[in-house]
Amino acid sequence: QLPLQESGPGLLKPSETLSLTCTVSGGSIYTKTYYWGWIRQPPGKGLEWIGSIYYSGTSYYNPSLNSRITISLDMSKSQFSLKLSSVTAADTAVYYCARGFGYCSGSICTYNPPDFDYWGQGTLVSVSS
Amino acid sequence: QSALTQPPSASGSPGQSVTISCTGTSSDVGNYKYVSWYQQHPGKAPKLMIYEVTKRPSGVPDRFSGSKSGNRASLTVSGLQADDEADYYCCAYAGSNNVVFGGGTKLTVL
């Protein structure tokens, strides 16, 4: 089993910046076959893809959140991070980090964008004044 | 981008089969082979059950199967068991490096 563990503040005030880190154990963060994503789930509601970052450092974001998101990768710490600026109560959710996978043949890799095979346990972030 | 459309609920008796639909558009479900399904038990993280429309990750029982026709994908659970009671989410690639989830279906085993 590949542990992923989210960490970060659980309570924010409106307009603050949400910062979460996902620590990846097991070493696979160095493997270009994998990519890394953030998904959130408001209480009692469905899942929402936030964004993903690839081995190259290239990241892609949900268009509805694009202007507020930054996802970064720190291989030296086996971590990737999420920053979401100007939060409101609508950003209250359980935030999950997850590993996505693809296939590599030599230097060419093809990724499966919606396929996350390992997930962290999730961390609840509440936004309230 | 709009969420994929799933029925809010589905049910079946133990041993029966149930199919959950996931309707998208020609820009997502209908245009790519990348449709996945996740199972989520209360208070737990989602678990990947199906990827690339029909493939099962290692360890997922073959009672779970996926299919697609046009803009609609489906998850079929055969031989229903009590532990299959959970929320199920479809997920698809929507092009331009975007990913979209369905609203989720609560499966009840009667």
Image: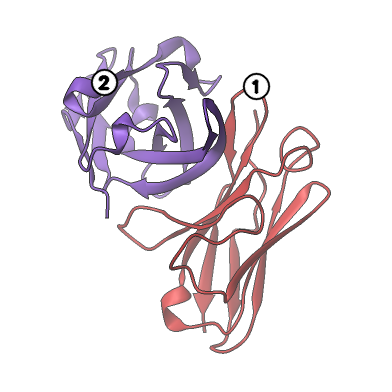
Chain colours: A purple, B red
Disc 2 to disc 1, C-alpha distance: 26 Å
User: At 40% from the left edge and 50% from the top edge, which residue is drawn?
Assistant: A44
Q: Position of residue A4 (x, y in %)?
A: 25, 42
Give neighbour class at mark 2: few <14, some 14-19, many 20+ (Cα, 10 Å): many
Identity, as a three-letter code, of the amino acid under mark 2: Leu
Q: Is residue A41 visible?
A: no
Q: Are marks 2 and 1 on the same chain?
A: no
User: At 54% from the left edge and 40% from the top edge, which residue is drawn?
Assistant: A114
Q: Which residue is mark 2?
A: A18
Q: Which residue is mark 1?
A: B96
Relative horizontal placement of residue A22, taking residue A46 as reference (left or right) = left
Q: Residue furthest bottom?
A: B15
Q: Which mark is residue A101?
A: none
Relative horizontal placement of residue A129, taking residue B37 as reference (left or right) = left
Relative horizontal placement of residue A128, taking residue B66 as reference (left or right) = left
Relative horizontal placement of residue A81, taking residue A63 as reference (left or right) = left
